[in-house]
Amino acid sequence: MTRQCLLLAFTLTLPLLVAFPQIDGERLTGVVLFPGRPLFSPLPASPEEPRLGLRREFGSMRMRLDIGAAYDILAYQPASDTSISFRLGAELFAFALTTSYQGLHLQVDAVDGYFGGHLVYQQRRAASSTLLRLRILHLSSHFIDGHFRLETKTWIDGQIPRPYSRDCAELTAAYTLGPVDWSVMLYAGFLHAWFVRPADMTRFNTCQGVVARTARWIGPVLGRPTNLYLADHFMLSGVGKLSGTNILEGGVKFGEWDGGGMKLYVSYQSGMEIYHQYYDVKRNNVGIGFALDVW
């Protein structure tokens, strides 16, 4: 079903391919292949967005390892209105829970993997923009060998792997206000899953959040801009009934805010566990990490 939805989204863009890129002033209009930086950058505090990095929890050996990216493949901008843009892209990413790294050997406990695609619409104005993103995603969650005791041939805490998967559509709207050196983004969205396993998972989830950043308080580092940022992401999901999870993240990004660079951050998570093999466990924690924005 997921492949059929992605094929449908791609098919709907085929009529755009008859419009070849043309230079209109300083803007490229028509269809562009591999346009570069994403139109809708991954939300910093959301646990279900592509990242490339590592986060270590304070007071434990638990770490989150993120691998993956979102990539815009096709861009379209009509010559009649260059304030409007469309993007079609792919998303493939995973995050893993590691519980130990003794002897330079990571004990990987659980992994959540995602793959799918997105369609993004943007309307630009003088000092603001409106964004709308539709994502079609498949999620699959698994316990790994770090959750298994070889000595006793048993699963840790007696918790055996639970088949978990989800096919869903997610629609998120965002409004960004600010000039080049600062901005505030407000966003909200909802997710509907047409397939979930186990069956008692909620099919309708919501999220909302804010991202604020400024390049005014810290000067450039080695010729590149530096941004301080604060992001908060709140989502409702759960088993049988909706439960809230909140993630607050703050830090500094070296590099352009919408371009490549590196984030160093501290974050606080409260509510339901983000690793879906532990979908019915509540947990609070504080951690420090880094993320590379590669596009």
Image: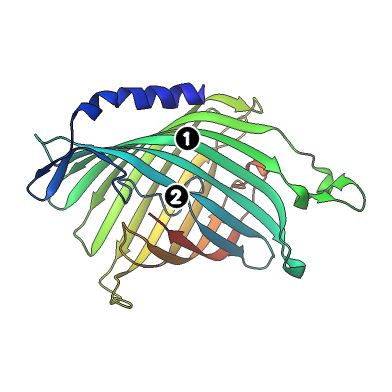
- Tag 1's secondary structure? strand
Q: Residue at x 57, y 36 (%)?
A: 139
In this view, which residue lies farthest toward the left? 25
**Residue 229: mark in rendering:** none
Taking the image as shown, residue 150 lies to the left or right of residue 184, namely right
Say if mark 1 contacts mark 2, CB within 8 Å: no
In the rendered image, which quarter contains the C terminus? bottom left
Residue type at tag 1? Gly
Tell which circle, 1 or 2, labels the residue nearer the N-terminal end: 1
Name the residue tied to disc 2: 233
Q: Residues within 10 Å of mark 1 (few under 14, many from 20)?
A: many
Q: Is residue 151 left or right of residue 284?
A: right
Q: Position of residue 140 (x, y in %)?
A: 61, 36
Mark 1 against mark 2, which lies toward the viewer?
1
In the rendered image, which quarter is residue 280 located in?
top right
Position in image of residue 17 (x %, y %): 24, 29
Which residue type does callout 2 highlight?
A: His
- Percent of width and height locating residue 145: 77, 49
**Which element type, helix, strand or loop, lies under badge 2?**
strand
Q: Viewer-proximal residue, 182 or 139?
A: 139
Cα separation between marks 1 and 2: 22 Å
Front in this rendered view, residue 73 or 238: 73
Give the farthest residue toward the right.
Answer: 152
Name the residue located 51 percent from the left edge and 61 percent from the top edge.
267
Q: Residues within 10 Å of mark 2 (few under 14, many from 20)?
A: many
Give residue 215's position: percent from left, percent from top. 27, 69
Residue 34 can be seen in this image: yes
Residue that carries the numbered disc 1 in the rendered image: 116
